[in-house]
Image (cartoon, rainbow, N blue to C red):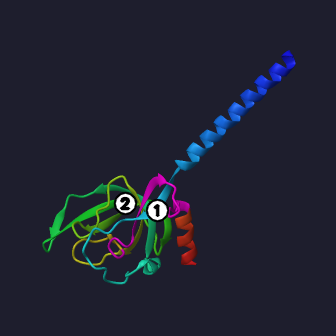
Amino acid sequence: MKTVLKKWKVLIVCLTAIIFVFIIFIFYSHNKQVTVVKHIPDNSTAKIVGDYLDEDDLIKAPYILEGTVTDISPSFEYGGIPFVKITFHINDILYSQSELKDSITILREQEMFTPLEKNQQYILYLYDYEGPIASQVKMICGGNLGAYEIVKEEVTNASQSIEEYKQEVKKALK
């Protein structure tokens, strides 16, 4: 009789443990956050002009970089338009037409395009700026078109992990 009672207790404890593990698995699989790539929303009224008119054109960018904004200069004006210089630390080079240092400077029109944020990670499609405002700086292709924010969020069907995104870019470059 005691042996049968012990077997029932062991069976109940095992079933309870299995149910508990199953509940924890379901909970964590539904609330899993991953690092994903999201296009920066375009809050501007500016129309895209130049060589980068749509996402397919971005692959022509001379530089495709993953990195972190480490500094943003105070705003300065040129021709009545406010600009900022952004220091961008490069974490990964997806494509580059020339050799780059660890950090680059990006020139950004402050009011026309969605601002980049300090300490935030991005994938940016860039080109060399040649003009009177600054020297040895880069600009984002197509304004906001060439700016993708790297964030942690819950997995959805529309989410694309950073690694999947990078693989697609590298495949498109071949």
Amino acid under label 1? Val
Farthest residue toward the top? 2
Q: Which residues are magenta?
A: 141-163
Rendered residue at 55%/77% (across/down): 172
Nearest the camera: 138 or 102?
138
Q: Secondary structure at mark 1?
A: strand
Confirm whether residue 140 shows in the render.
Answer: yes
Inspect the magenta stretch and tell me whether residue 44 lies in it.
Answer: no
> In the figure, 54 relative to 19: above or below?
below
Horizontally, is 13 left or right of 139 in the view?
right
Horizontally, is 4 left or right of 113 in the view?
right
Of circles 1 and 2, which is in front?
Answer: 1
Say which mark, if any, is on residue 37.
1
Horizontally, is 73 left or right of 159 in the view?
left
- Horizontal and vertical percent for residue 23? 61, 40
At label 1, counting other C-alpha atoms closer than 10 Å, the crowd grade (few under 14, some 14-19, many 20 or more) is: many
At label 2, counting other C-alpha atoms closer than 10 Å, the crowd grade (few under 14, some 14-19, many 20 or more) is: many
Mark pair 1, 2: CA separation: 17 Å
Q: Secondary structure at mark 2?
A: strand
**Quadrant of the rendered image containing residue 86:** bottom left
- Horizontal and vertical percent for residue 63? 44, 72
> In the figure, 111 relative to 172: above or below?
above
Q: Earlier in the sequence, mark 1 or mark 2?
A: 1
Rendered residue at 27%/63% (across/down): 85
Amino acid under label 2? Phe
Farthest residue toward the front? 1
Residue at which label 2 appears: 88
Rendered residue at 24%/58% (across/down): 73
The quadrant of the picture occupied by the N terminus is top right
